[in-house]
Amino acid sequence: MLEFVDPSIRESCSPTEVSRCITVGLMCVQDHANDRPTMPSVVVILESGTTNNALPKQPTVDANRSPRETDSSTFDHRLSTNASFTGLTGR
């Protein structure tokens, strides 16, 4: 996980702190807003040094599936019929 840290500051980082920051970041980008922590709880997690065993949920969207194959609750049904989705492919 230290590979995610900028090499210029890697030596001064605690692996525990890096792990906590990655966990909080993943919690903040969960599919459903109700699953994301509030900013006050993010501050508490970062200041207290504990995530209270909270782990981010597995993402619902998979780059290998089309939007129609994913959980319909993850998409805003108010999108116009002209909306398009771009698939991700490696080079």
Image (cartoon, grey):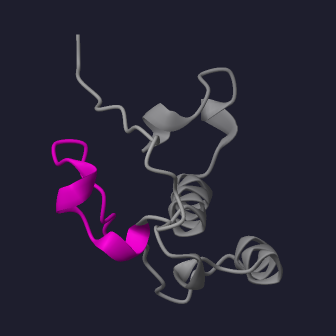
**Residue at the location (57% across, 52% down)?**
18
Does the stretch in magenta take in 83? no
Image quarter (top left, top right, bottom left or bottom right) of the N terminus: top left
Report if residue 57 is visible in the image: no
**Residue at the location (22% across, 57% down)?**
68
Position of 43 compared to 69: left or right?
Answer: right
Position of 41 compared to 37: left or right?
Answer: right
> Which stretch did the figure color magenta?
57-74
Q: Position of residue 31 (x, y in %)?
A: 46, 68
Position of 91 compared to 38: left or right?
Answer: left
Where is 20 relative to 50, above or below?
above
Q: Position of residue 21 (x, y in %)?
A: 61, 58
Position of 76 compared to 6: left or right?
Answer: left
**Residue at the location (59% across, 76% down)?**
33
Q: Position of residue 82 (x, y in %)?
A: 46, 41
Quadrant assignment, res 10 = top right
